Amino acid sequence: ASALKVIADVLAKEPVRPRAARPELPADLETVVLTCLAKDPARRYATADALADDLERWLRDEPVRARPVGPLERAWRIFREAYSGVSG
């Protein structure tokens, strides 16, 4: 793929869920990773300290503060991604 296509994909497409490639990855760790990669800045960690706090919580086997994206929002993202290039 060309560099331009890679950049366009990074900007437009949702990241591949880490557990798709590594099913053994804990769900909470995947949630932390996806929070870091969120397209919407409001959905990312507000500070490096907030990310560090969640990683420390995960290491202590405590619930992380980040929440996974629900099925309705996931479906909306897929729909939006599929139709983002369609002109009407």
Image (tube, rainbow, N blue to C red):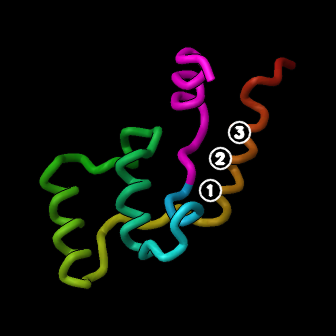
Distance, label 2 to label 1, CA atoms, is 6 Å
Residue that badge 1 annotates: 73
- The residue carrying pointer 3 sits among few (fewer than 14), some (14 to 19) or many (20 or more) residues within 10 Å by Cα, namely few
Q: Residue furthest right?
A: 88
Residue 21 percent across, percent down from the top left: 56, 61
Q: Are marks 2 and 1 in contact (CB under 8 Å)?
A: yes
Which residue, given by chain and number where applicable, does mark 3 sit on? 80
Query: In the visual, does 52 lie left or right of 68?
Result: left
| Proximity of marks 2 and 3: CB atoms separated by less than 8 Å | yes
Q: Left or right? Give the position of 67 relative to 8.
A: left
Say if the magenta span includes residue 5.
yes
Q: Position of residue 6 (x, y in %)?
A: 55, 25
Residue bearing mark 2: 77
Cα gap from disc 3 to disc 1, whole angstroms:
10 Å
Seen in the picture, residue 7 relative to 44 is either above or below; the reply is above
User: Which picture quadrant has residue 75?
Assistant: bottom right
